[in-house]
């Protein structure tokens, strides 16, 4: 690759045995997807992961504080999209289920679905953030 590729941080795509050789034990992030998404640009990979990790607590707080079904669905949708963008498929799947939950229904209130949904999203999100921390430590 020429000097232009080097300027973009893509001069040396990550080989299977480079930074991600000893992948975190969890499958929290699909690293092959992330590499394709960032076109092998390691600097961009790191930036995207840092942005996700920095913003994730804000998205979770929006979900916790949602006062309406619309606000709930929007917060869950944001988490779903952000997770999918970095290859966090489990998180995105959980957020998709949470997005569909009618938190204003009597059944959801009686069974405490809202609290259980927040707990599920929180667990998956924390797993992704731990994975990101481990990946960035190797960088």
Image (cartoon, rainbow, N blue to C red):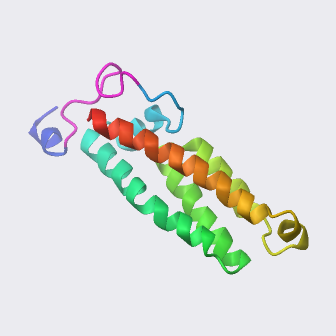
Image: magenta residue range: 9-22
Question: Quadrant location of the N terminus?
Answer: top left
Image x and y of residue 33, in percent: 47, 37
Left or right placement of residue 131 versus residue 95 in this view:
left
Along the line of sight, which residue is nearer the eye, 130 or 100? 130
Residue 64: image location, x then y, percent: 62, 69
The residue that appears at 29% across and 37% down in the rendered structure is: 137
Residue lying farthest bottom? 67
Q: Is residue 85 left or right of residue 38?
A: right
Expressed as whole percent of the image width and height from the top left, the position of residue 108 reads: 84, 67
Q: Main secondary structure of the magenta part?
A: loop
> Where 65 sits versus 95, above or below?
below
Q: Is residue 95 visible?
A: no
Figure label count: 0
Q: Quadrant of residue 27?
A: top right
Foreground residue, 36 or 117? Answer: 117
- Residue 99: where, in percent of width, then height? 70, 62
What is the quadrant of the C terminus in the image? top left
Identified at 80% across, 68% down, the residue is 102
The quadrant where residue 104 appears: bottom right
Residue 14 shows in the view: yes
Q: Nearer the viewer, residue 90 or 58?
A: 58
70 lies left or right of 104: left
Q: Residue at x 25, y 44 (%)?
A: 43
Assess whether residue 12 is covered by the magenta stretch. yes
Q: Left or right? Give the position of 103 relative to 43.
A: right
Q: Residue at x 13, y 44 (%)?
A: 7
């Amino acid at each position: 690759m020429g000097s232009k590729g080097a300027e973009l941080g893509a001069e040396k795509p990550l080989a299977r045995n480079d930074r991600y050789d000893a992948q975190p034990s969890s499958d929290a992030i699909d690293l092959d997807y992330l590499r394709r998404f960032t076109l092998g640009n390691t600097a961009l990979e790191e930036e995207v992961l840092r942005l996700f990790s920095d913003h994730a607590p804000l998205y979770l707080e929006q979900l916790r504080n949602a006062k309406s079904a619309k606000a709930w669905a929007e917060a869950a949708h944001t988490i779903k999209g952000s997770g999918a963008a970095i290859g966090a498929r489990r998180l995105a799947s959980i957020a998709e289920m949470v997005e569909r939950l009618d938190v204003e229904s009597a059944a959801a209130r009686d069974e405490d679905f809202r609290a259980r949904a927040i707990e599920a999203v929180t667990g998956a999100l924390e797993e992704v953030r731990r994975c990101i921390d481990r990946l960035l430590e190797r960088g």
